[in-house]
Image (cartoon, rainbow, N blue to C red):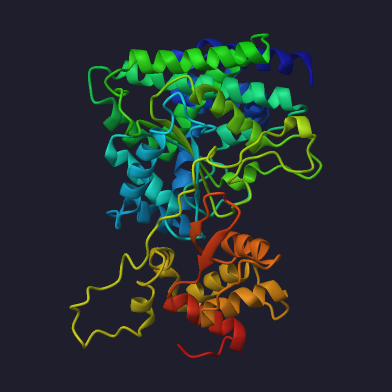
Amino acid sequence: MNIDTINLQRTFEKIVDHELSLFGKPVWKLISEDTPKFWNDNRAQLEPLLRTGSSSAIVQYVQDMYKKSIKINERRSESSDVGFLKAAFCEPYRGMAAQALYEALTDDNHGFDGSSKHYGKFKAYIQGSGSGKSRTIMELTTKGVFVIYINLRSPMDVDNWPPRDDIIADILLGPVQTADEYEKLCCVFFAALFTTLEEFITAHALEDALSVWNELIGDELKRKEWFMDVQMQYRLKATVDQSLSDAKRKMILSLDTLVKKCPTYFPKTHVPKLAIVFDEAHYLNPDKDSKFSRPHLLCRTISTYSHQSTDSIWVLFVLTSSRISDFAAPAFLYPSQRVSLSGVRLCPPFITTGSDHFAPPLATSVDYDFAAWHNVIRFGRPLWLSLRHLGLKGLVALGRNKLTNSPNASSDYSNDTYLCVLAQRFGLDLCIGHPDAGVHVENAIAGHMRTCTGVTPDRWWMFSTYPSEPFLSHVAATVLYGEAFPV
């Protein structure tokens, strides 16, 4: 790179650093995340504009690029399954699962009265794929709860909804060397989250901040802009040289400031006021090569501030796997990192979603063709009806992939997979006393669409079943008997 090009790049970086009012906040934050990359990707267009000496031309070009990226994302959403999944979130909510979750959080908060042995204000929401967990969580926004929704799904899983929240996922899943370093990261993250929310509520003091928030959290682009604010706060707080104890103290102070400055939204009652939601939380699972457990340290951070306030501020982990529902350090970690989480120290997982929400009423005419595939998909989990545009063949392929936990049709499935298929087709139950039953149930819920129906108080056993679900039974039949199995 010659001297002239270097000088032009420096000029561009100065414009980005100092011309916030010209770019507009969303555009400025987007390019300031990685200015060198933006320069390298657009150098051929930027260099001639910089030589003219016109800052306004630079600003106009960057704004045009920003608008173009938004239109590309919109076209992608409309032309894929994402658009249909997104539309399902806008339909009226059905069922009582959201109300049950609201009441469960209220009851759990009574457990933090100063004498409780509860570990922390976090709760797992465990259920099989396509059962409506994310939609249920978002329905809490209609009950006076600030919901901070964060999706941690794989960056490769792009054709899904809600999308991955890259900014927060990169913070929590990024490379960290030691347990203390990650615990301090968690403290700084929560402090940034509380501070940014307090600034948002304060900025909307003359209007209904909760209504404005609900509009923001339901909009992908607005949510990303708000997470950029969190990221800026995080970077600001993370640059300060501080010990772990200092980071914990500042986190607690940030929460205290949020509650005291926004008393209208945080009254002294046990009903939930704030729910920080980590969807697809199983991506927090540690690798076997890791020397610490991210879920364990994240929840230890939550425990740190949970006992400092009676305010009903909760963290929800939404997942299909029960593997981190206990959030204890795994056995392969050094014993000093483990904590005792037996008895009633953890709040019980929430499992309610309901079923048959789109089924026709019982008084439906006898002429109604219940056996037609477009009516069959109204029974069971809501996933099938949400993706009805795929047609019968597409839905069967999707169901087969999910039931077998395999991306491709095959006749060479494992014995465990065939056991799941048989259990769905014929309603087979499991003897939970068998040594292998626990692992099988866990894997079946996580990867084979089995439904969790209960968890014992000591969390040693999970009860599960395949409830009546005619379309999934048809899918199971195609696995057992081949694609030619009649509808």
Lateral position of residue 382 relative to residue 158, left or right: left
Q: How many marks?
A: 0
Up-down relation of residue 268 to residue 410 (above or below): above
Position of the N terminus, as image quadrant, is top right
For the residue pair 317 and 1, the one nearer the viewer reads as: 317
- State the image coordinates of residue 479 (x, y, percent, origin top left): 60, 81
Left or right, 79 with reference to 262: right
Residue 387 image point, x, y percent: 42, 65
Q: Quadrant of residue 274?
A: top left
What x and y, as percent, mark residue 42? 62, 30
Q: Nearer the viewer, residue 111 or 241?
A: 111
Residue 206 in sight: yes
In this view, 484 is above or below 301: below
Q: Is residue 34 above or below residue 260?
A: below
* Near-viewer residue (43 or 403): 403
Q: Is residue 449 above or below residue 319?
A: below
The answer to whether 110 appears left or right of 473 in the picture is left
Q: Residue at x 60, y 65 (%)?
A: 444
Residue 32 visible somewhere in the drawing: no
**Quarter that holds the C terminus:** bottom left
Task: Report the residue at 28% width, 41% height from top.
Answer: 142
